[in-house]
Image (cartoon, grey):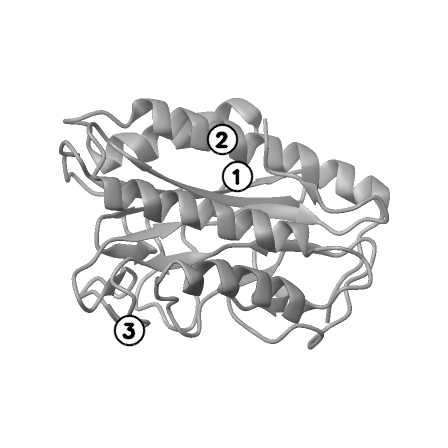
Amino acid sequence: MVEIKTDQSLAAMREAGRVVAQGLTAAREAAHIGSTLRELDEVAHEVLRKAGASSPFLHYKPAFAPTPFPAVICASVNDAIVHGIPDDYRLCDGDLVSVDFGAKLDGWAGDSAISFTVGTPRPADTKLVETAFAALDAGIAAATVGNRIGDIAHAIGTVCRKAGYGIPEGFGGHGIGRQMHEDPSVPNEGRPGRGMLLKHGMVLAIEPMLIGGGTDRYYEDRDGWTLRTVDGSRAAHAEHTVAITDDGPRILTTL
């Protein structure tokens, strides 16, 4: 069931989204050569504490997971696509990092992700990250009243495929509101004009995931959470929580 949010609820979700943006900004600023992924998690956790917010990631245990998630961010490095667990790995010059972060404030959730390079970027990584954000922008632009879920999926997929990148099958965006994951699912590839009709008050987490090597294949790491590219190529992830409104798409996870 898809919950249609009131304008008052959208305003409350904007506040949760602001906390998410603050946490991602803080985590990126803390990401230097030599920083550990656990340190990035601690920085984001402190943002939640100061805001009086909680983490929808911490202790989250979906059906596929062998254990609850142990952190407030997902930190995925290089060939890790999504769901990386922050540990004591120290960031190296040229590492490609994706950080996914959520917050729950006054009963409403927000969810967003960024990708960036630590130190000196590889040109191929720069293009990959730029394309991830371009795909996100295209998906957001298609998130308008009267369009359908397939229009968002088609917009994202078109950008990714034109650049020659892979899209991990079975993973994409989702509805969001009182819970981090709600209906409907938002694929990263699809046919325009298909799927659920978009209405004022729907809120979606739109999140392209790109595999640099061009294949769609991935495997699950031994931790039961991290998804990695089969070919060892690098990956990027970008995400915003977006409200569908009569005035156009409204990004809720910005500062």
Locate residue 120: give its quadrant: top left
Q: Residue at x 77, y 63 (%)?
A: 198
Mark with earlier residue (3, 2): 2
Front-most of 164 and 112? 164
Q: Residue at x 33, y 35 (%)?
A: 41
Circle 2 residues within 10 Å: few <14, some 14–19, many ≥20: many
- Which amino acid, mark 1? Ser
Residue that badge 2 annotates: 48
* Vertical side of 195 occupied by 88: above or below: above
**Coordinates of residue 157 in the picture (x, y in percent):** 50, 65
Locate residue 28: give its quadrant: top left
Q: Residue at x 35, y 50 (%)?
A: 236
Q: Secondary structure at mark 1?
A: loop
Q: Quadrant of the C terminus?
A: top right
- Which amino acid, mark 3? Arg
Residue that badge 3 annotates: 217
Mark with earlier residue (1, 3): 1
* Mark whose residue sits in front, 3 or 2: 3
Q: Quadrant of the N terminus?
A: bottom right
Circle 1 residues within 10 Å: few <14, some 14–19, many ≥20: many
Residue that badge 1 annotates: 54
Mark with earlier residue (1, 2): 2
- Which amino acid, mark 2? Leu
Q: Residue at x 35, y 68 (%)?
A: 65
Front-most of 34 and 160? 160
Residue 61 appears in the figure: no
